[in-house]
Image (tube, rainbow, N blue to C red):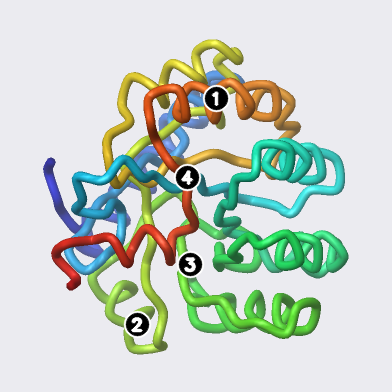
Amino acid sequence: MRIYVLSRSKMVFAFLVVIIVGGLLTVSERLLITPSLVRAPGTYYMAHTQEKVVALTFDDGPDPIDTPDVLDILKEREVKATFFVLGQAAQSNPNLLKRLVKEGHEIGNHSFDHDYQQRRLVEQINQTDKEVFAATGTHTHYYRPPGGFLSKYQLETIKNNGRVVALWSVDSKDWRNPGVKQIVDNVMKNVFPGSIILLHDGGYHRIQTVKALGPIIDALKDRGYRLATLSELKTMDSETK
C-alpha cells in the first residue's frame, strides 16, 4: 500500500491543477475530480489486524435530512460508527450531535467549513470542537482533513495539538453519486480486516448513501465482519500494542 505525504509545493500545485481544470468542466464533471485519499506516515487509515473488524465513518454532517436516516439504519442493525462533523453543520444541528452520542457513536472533527487548504487549521479545529463540546460535553480526538489533503507541516501541527489524523482505506465514492449498487460494490470489492470505510451523511443530498448503507452493513455481516468505532478498531491494531 503506497504511503506518502504531499509537500507544500506539491500541494499548492495540486490545487492549481484542480482550479485550472475545474474551470473547463461542467459541475457534474467537477465532482469526479474531488480531492482523493492521501495516506501519510503518522496518520490512522487502517488497523493492522487479522480480525474481521472494520469501521464505518461518515463525513460532512450532521445533516437534518440524511443524518437521521443514517442513524435509524445504524440503530436498527445495532452498529456504531464514527461521524466526522463540520463545525458549521454542528452549530446548526446540536440535537443531532446529542443523538449521536446518546446512541453510542463517536464524533470526529472535520474542520469548520471544509476549506481544502485549511488556512486556519487550528482555529477551525478548535471552533468545531467547541461546538461539539457545547452540545455533548465531549471533545473530539480524531481529525480528518477535508479531501484527505495535508502537508507535513499541517500533520505536525495537528499532532502537536493532541489529535490523531484519521483518513480511510476504503472509499465508497458516494461523493460521486454513482448509484446505490456501485457504492455497495466500491465497499465490498475493497474491504479487508481493519478497513476504515469512507461514507458521507452531509455536504450534498445523500439519498444514495442512505439507500446503500443497509445493504453494505448486511453484506459485511454476511462475510463475518463486525463493525466498530475508530477508537475500538484502533485497540486491535497490532502495530500499536
Label 3, residues with CA under 10 Å away: few <14, some 14-19, many ≥20: some
Q: Nearer the viewer, residue 188 or 163?
A: 188
| Sequence-first tag of 4 and 2 | 2
Between tags 4 and 2, which lies in front? 4
Q: Residue 124 got which mark?
A: none
Q: Nearer the viewer, residue 101 or 90?
A: 101
Local secondary structure at mark 3: loop
| Sequence-first tag of 1 and 4 | 1
CA separation in Å, label 4 and label 2: 31 Å
CA separation in Å, label 2 and label 1: 39 Å
**Badge 2 amino acid:** Thr
Name above or below for residue 198 compared with residue 23: below
**Badge 1 amino acid:** Asp
Residue to which mark 1 is pinned: 218
CA separation in Å, label 2 and label 3: 12 Å
Residue to which mark 3 is pinned: 118
CA separation in Å, label 1 and label 4: 11 Å
What is the quadrant of residue 178 in the picture?
top right
Percent x, y of residue 192? 27, 34
Residue to which mark 4 is pinned: 227
58 displayed left or right of 154: right
Residue to which mark 2 is pinned: 157
Q: Residue at x 36, y 36 (%)?
A: 170
